[in-house]
Image (tube, coloured by chain):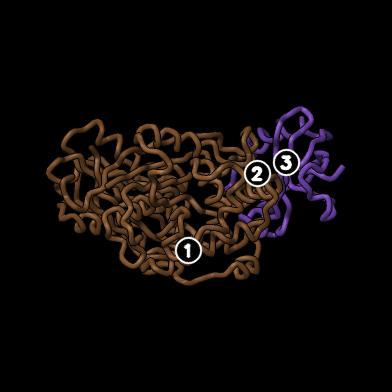
Chain colours: A brown, B purple
Amino acid sequence: MNSIIGYYSTQFGELWKKSLDNLLIESFNGALSQCNIEKEQIDAIFLGNMLGGLVDSSLLLEAHIAELLEVHIPVYRVEAACASGGMAVQMAHEYLLAHKDSTVVALGGEKMTDVSAEHITQALATAASPTEQAVGLTFPGVYALLAQIYLKKYHYTEEHLAAISVKNHSHGVLNEKAHFRRYVTVDDVLDSPYIAYPLKVLDSSPISDGAAAVVMTNQSSLTKSSKAATIRSSEVATDTISLAKRGKLDGLLATEIAGKKAFKTSGLKQKDINIMEVHDCFSIGEILALEDLGFWKKGQGGAQAQEMAGHVESKGNLIVNTSGGLKAAGHPVGGTGIKQIGEIYLQLTGQAGKRQVASVPTCGLAHNVGGSGGVAVVTILST
Amino acid sequence: MTQSPVRLWRKQTHDKKLLETTGVILSWTEISVAPPKFASGTPYTVVLVELLSGERTYGQLVDFKDSDRTIGAKVKAVYRRYGTVAKEDLIEYGVKFKPL
């Protein structure tokens, strides 16, 4: 049985005083101190990062970590665009399944604010296909194509998308580590400038610096902690990098496949899940995720989005993105997947502070997407 | 980083097969924030097109009225200049689409 026994996230935001190395080491040390583990007890490290080579001129991050920690253990760098963090946890989970009596750390982080908006747009666009990049299609642009198809097919408007941002900002207010801690209204979202029609600034997750780390173990002496959450499943699925090659354009097939695998492996059903963090890189992303994971029927997401309550608790609706999601908590891409799983861990172990769901949940799901759905990782935890 | 012109040549060997082909718009967006190569052209419209052959491809939409930007509208492939390049780089051409 693999468990998470510790979690730490740095502040997410424009962190001008901190380098990528600063962020990674802070999250690593923070997670270890949360569960009173020494670095000598760690058998391997899984590091999620997308842009180190493109934005920070930093590759071979394995050796950065070895230098910072003064260790010689295996460090595996994982790149799956915005799913790098979720993939790092998934690979760490696989490692633990293959290695008895082991303890590992999955961490992820990104330094994104040292370059201009145009250059970070170019860097993020590398998660789109070469044919998409060649015509000036940006990463928000690819999601905008998906949004147009969804809105047209199911007769929704930009107002339905805006409901997601309003909810997630209301959650972000309660998260002291969030990039944005302010409420927004539907009118605020609708009045914000377009970045890729029909998606606007307030439909979109921000460019953030930040890092997060979880300590994972299968050592029975450690998993008995009251602050442990069990990893019931962690599954990955892939799809074409280019939207043009996909049969399905009103959802993400990789999410659907990874979700089905994760539910099957865990033996749990959608009704068992009390809390979720899903990949809302753009507002349309959360709607597609909740449909593709089987919580809403295809095409109902626009209407359901307007029914979801904010302020953590909902009146019988799904409780989604209590961290503020990517939208409000921020999206340091390599760190996001770790933060999502960390948020579920905090909620399951009653450590989520002001945003703690009053009736402490027993099962939670984290959903992390790379590119426009070329990779999806779904992880299910329980108490 | 300057790219080898061979990369451009590889792309154009495929693009030339698309010239004068027609198709319908499956989706479209207007890009307002673009990478440096395309920044001087913002806002510009990109369409996802399904050609009569069944192949799906992308291109910028040119010579259009707002009402032409409609899912299901017919378009034709044309050859146009793409993006801004450095003084010593090859000028890049590629397929764009215009309303039919």
Find residue B95 and report its image quarter: top right
Residue named by callout 2: A134
Let me know if residue A204 appears in the view.
no
Q: Which element type, helix, strand or loop, lies under badge 1? A: loop
Left or right: A205 in relation to A39: right
Q: Where is residue A14 in the image (x, y as percent from the top left)?
A: 43, 67
Spatial CA distance of label 2 from label 3 is 18 Å
Kindly indicate whether the residues beneath marks 3 and 1 are on one polypeptide chain: no
Q: Which of B56 and A191 lies nearest the eye of the viewer? A: A191
* Subunit ID for the residue under disc 3: B
Spatial CA distance of label 3 from label 1 is 34 Å
Circle nearer the viewer, 2 or 1: 1
Q: Which element type, helix, strand or loop, lies under badge 2? A: helix
Residue named by callout 1: A310
Crowding at mark 2 (Cα within 10 Å: few <14, some 14-19, many 20+): some
Kindly indicate whether the residues beneath marks 2 and 3 are on one polypeptide chain: no
**What is the quadrant of the N terminus of chain A in the image?**
top left
Kindly identify the amino acid type of the residue bearing the numbered disc 1: Gly
Q: Which of A173 and B67 lies nearest the eye of the viewer? A: A173
Q: Which of A256 and A66 lies nearest the eye of the viewer? A: A256
Say above or below: A244 vs A204.
above
Q: Where is residue A366 in the image (x, y as percent from the top left)?
A: 40, 47
